[in-house]
Image (cartoon, rainbow, N blue to C red):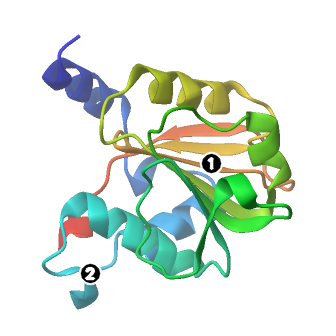
Amino acid sequence: MTKKESYFKFWWRSSNEHGVHSPFIFNLLMKGLYPKDSRWNGMSVKNAFVARIEAYYAPKTVGVYGDYISSLSNTIDFKTISGQCDMIGIGKGESLPDLTKVYAAMHNDSILVIDRRVEVASVEAYWQEIVNDDRFTATIDFYYFGVAFVRTEQLKQHFVLRMSSMLFH
């Protein structure tokens, strides 16, 4: 399937805030990703997405794996983490971390972001493992990024959402 066909298929299946019935995910969209804010002017859409996620959650510890690029200065190499992180960012690399280690490094308010901007079969397969893993209770497919949570108060749900045009203002 070509990139255009893949994106069209995604667009057809995806929704925006009107298709979300989880207050937690709705708040992420409406307070974190969709509001207009001059801080994001001049940033590429995809970099603005990462910066908005990081600004909304304000993680104290960010574990970084592969070529994931964070806009924050408090990043640490995920391979050296012995405790839990507020946020984990994973990009393509020589290998991908074991999901059991990723899950163990997350707490109820942690966020996992998978950078899927470069189409790599191993990253896509890894993302599908996360979506299908019952330990990750909320997963969001934003096409270029995958976002996952382990919230105990949330039933298992998978969302396919567009990065709204409001994100680009």
Residue 32 horizontal/vertical position (percent):
45, 74
Q: Which residue bears the numbered disc 2?
A: 36
Q: Which mark is residue 157?
A: none
> Is 162 left or right of 41, judged from the image as shown?
right
Q: Amino acid at mark 1?
A: Ala
Pinpoint residue 106: horizontal percent, then vertical percent: 78, 57
**Residue 22 appears in which quarter of the rendering?**
bottom right
Q: Is residue 155 above or below residue 33?
A: above
Q: Residue furthest top?
A: 1
Question: Is the N terminus in the top left, top right, bottom left or bottom right quadrant?
Answer: top left
The front one of 20 and 54 is: 54
Coordinates of residue 117 in the picture (x, y in percent) = 31, 42
Q: Which mark is residue 148?
A: 1
Give left or right: position of 113 versus 105: left
The foreground one among 16 and 94 is: 94
Q: Residues within 10 Å of mark 2 (few under 14, many from 20)?
A: some
Which of pointers 2 and 1 lies earlier in the amino acid sequence?
2
58, 100: nearer the viewer: 100
